[in-house]
Amino acid sequence: MQITIRTILGAAFPLDVTPAETMLEFRHDIAKAVQLALDQFYLTYDQETLSDDNTIDDYGIQDKAVVFCVQRPASSRTVDARVEGAESLTVGFRLTDTVQKLKRIISERAFGRRCPLKMLFNGLPLEDSKTLNECGLGQHAAVSVKRV
């Protein structure tokens, strides 16, 4: 079935879903489409805020229904960088920043100069060319950083 997602700014786009899909799964699809992190928006249908644990069917959402994507107010985003061989840092970021930019900022603040770093989020290495949004960094993330 197809559901239309409408934003507060009036943009609308269709998404194919199944009735058994959870709202969290649905929100992941929307996050990719609108390039927002999951913590940046919530969904409403029939004037009700939709809970991540429930399914599309639980809410009685039918084919061709319209679900609203409501962006949360902007708030500061920070990453706590646990840097091996230096003090931990808290660094502000935008979701559109790349991992490479964050590494540059951390290396300059932690070591006083640019140096190659390896950065892990949830135990997985982050690719330099990816944006922090693509890597799933939310409002207050923590990363491990090592010099290489």
Image (tube, grey):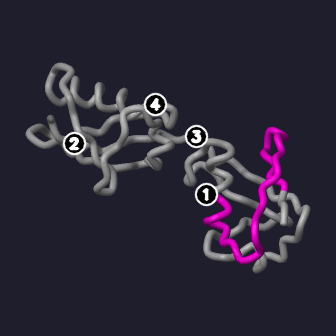
- Residue designated by label 3: 74
Q: Residue at x 71, y 67 (%)?
A: 50
Q: Position of residue 24 (x, y in %)?
A: 61, 66
- Residue designated by label 4: 97
Q: Residues within 10 Å of mark 1 (few under 14, many from 20)?
A: some
Q: Kindly identify the amino acid type of the residue bearing the numbered disc 4.
A: Asp
Question: In the displayed structure, would residue 106 be above or below residue 14?
Answer: above
* Disc on the earlier residue, 1 or 3: 1
Disc 3 and disc 4: Cα gap in Å?
16 Å
Residue found at the far bottom of this picture: 58
- Cβ atoms under marks 3 and 4 closer than 8 Å: no
* Disc on the earlier residue, 1 or 2: 1
Q: Nearer the viewer, mark 1 or mark 3?
A: 1
Q: Residue at x 47, y 49 (%)?
A: 136
SS for dot 1: helix
- Cβ atoms under marks 1 and 4 closer than 8 Å: no
Q: Residues within 10 Å of mark 3 (few under 14, many from 20)?
A: few
- Residue designated by label 1: 28
- Residue designated by label 2: 145
Instruction: Determine the image quadrant of residue 15.
Output: bottom right
Q: Kindly identify the amino acid type of the residue bearing the numbered disc 1.
A: His
- Residues shaded magenta: 4-27
Q: Position of residue 38 (x, y in %)?
A: 57, 54
Disc 1 and disc 4: Cα gap in Å?
20 Å
Residue found at the far top of this picture: 113
Q: Residues within 10 Å of mark 4 (few under 14, many from 20)?
A: some
* Disc on the earlier residue, 1 or 4: 1
The answer to whether 69 appears left or right of 31 in the picture is right
Instruction: Determine the image quadrant of residue 18.
Output: bottom right
Q: Quadrant of the C terminus?
A: top left
SS for dot 2: strand
Disc 1 and disc 2: Cα gap in Å?
27 Å
